[in-house]
Image: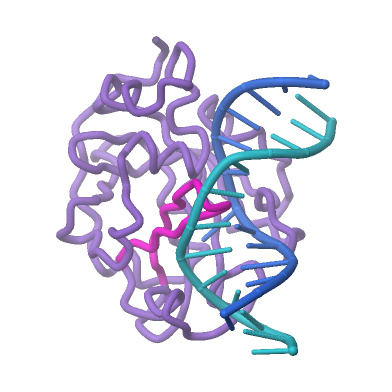
Chain colours: A purple, B blue, C cyan
DNA sequence: CCTGCGATTTGCT
DNA sequence: GCAAATCGCAGGC
């Protein structure tokens, strides 16, 4: 077990205005919010920002069948397959017409933990291995590739604000993980000191 | 049409 | 620590 569970009350579901901002602001402010799918989820502790005019972003190649959702309205899901095996869940940010995506990389599991265990038998004991990576999250929450383009405002995938009174997490930033392009940009956002990160963060000095 | 690669995870050397 | 697994997609021919 661990200090993971402890499901406090969920705050209000995030709506359009939250997502219709700059990608990096959305990435930072998603920390502390709770990602839920079909009764299973947890508190977001790690995100990364991907912006239109930066080569690591899928939208860098312009508008294609694959990237159209990134250029569309904010507050939708972008789910794609990586290495032919793993699904990656992103939140579409920025105004309609501007591409931006926030990759959700790690959660502190709080709800449906037994369900997560069934779906991730390799996670080992404890709750650290359940959602400590973008592929693990989609497995634990059973997020499907077909859910790309779904609205996060009224679809089955929901993000809830922290409940009133919860102190916002201290945020640290560093380089994004696993990139071959634009690996220098410090657009990874983590809750400081969280034991649920996909990997420890090399902190870069700088603001959000 | 065919080729090469990628925002990862896991298990083995 | 390293390499395999496995496939959608972008770009070249």
Question: Looking at this view, is A128 or A115 the one in front?
Answer: A115
- Look at the image and give the residue range highlighted in magenta: A75-93
Main secondary structure type of the part rendered in magenta: strand
Q: Position of residue A1 (x, y in %)?
A: 39, 10
Is residue A70 placed above or below A191 in the rendered structure? below
A120 in the magenta segment: no
Q: Which quadrant of the figure has residue A203?
A: top right
Q: Which quadrant of the figure has residue A19?
A: bottom left
Residue occupying the point 19% across, 35% down: A39
Residue occupying the point 49% across, 46% down: A86
Query: Number of numbered discs present?
Result: 0
Q: Residue furthest left?
A: A154
Looking at the image, can residue A170 be seen?
Answer: yes
Looking at the image, can residue A102 be seen?
Answer: no
Residue occupying the point 73% across, 40% down: A202
Q: Position of residue A92 (x, y in %)?
A: 39, 67
Is residue A132 placed above or below A18 in the rendered structure? above
Would residue A103 be found to the left or right of residue A174 on screen? left
Is residue A82 placed above or below A21 in the rendered structure? above
Question: Looking at this view, is A205 or A22 the one in front?
Answer: A22
Would residue A199 be found to the left or right of residue A140 on screen? right
A81 in the magenta segment: yes
Image quarter hosting the C terminus of chain A: bottom right
Would residue A206 be found to the left or right of residue A20 on screen? right
Residue occupying the point 56% across, 65% down: A50
Q: Position of residue C6 (x, y in %)?
A: 52, 48
Q: Position of residue A9 (x, y in %)?
A: 19, 32
């Amino acid at each position: 077990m661990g200090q993971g569970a402890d499901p406090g009350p969920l705050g209000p579901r995030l709506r359009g205005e939250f997502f219709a901002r700059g990608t990096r602001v959305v990435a930072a402010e998603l920390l502390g919010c709770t990602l839920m799918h079909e009764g299973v989820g947890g508190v977001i502790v790690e995100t990364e920002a991907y912006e239109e005019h930066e080569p690591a972003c899928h939208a860098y190649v312009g508008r294609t069948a694959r990237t159209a959702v990134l250029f569309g309205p904010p507050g939708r899901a972008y789910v794609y397959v990586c290495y032919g095996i793993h699904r990656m869940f992103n939140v579409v940010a920025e105004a309609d017409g501007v591409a931006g995506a926030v990759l959700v990389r790690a959660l502190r599991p709080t709800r449906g933990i037994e369900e997560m265990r069934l779906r991730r038998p390799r996670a080992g004991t404890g709750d650290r291995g359940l959602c400590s990576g973008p592929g693990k999250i989609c497995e634990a929450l059973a997020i499907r590739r077909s859910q790309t383009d779904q609205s996060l405002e009224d679809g089955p995938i929901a993000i809830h604000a922290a409940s009133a009174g919860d102190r916002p997490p201290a945020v640290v930033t560093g380089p994004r993980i696993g990139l071959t392009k634009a690996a220098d940009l410090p657009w990874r956002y983590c809750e400081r000191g969280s034991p649920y990160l996909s990997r420890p963060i090399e902190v870069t000095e700088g603001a959000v």
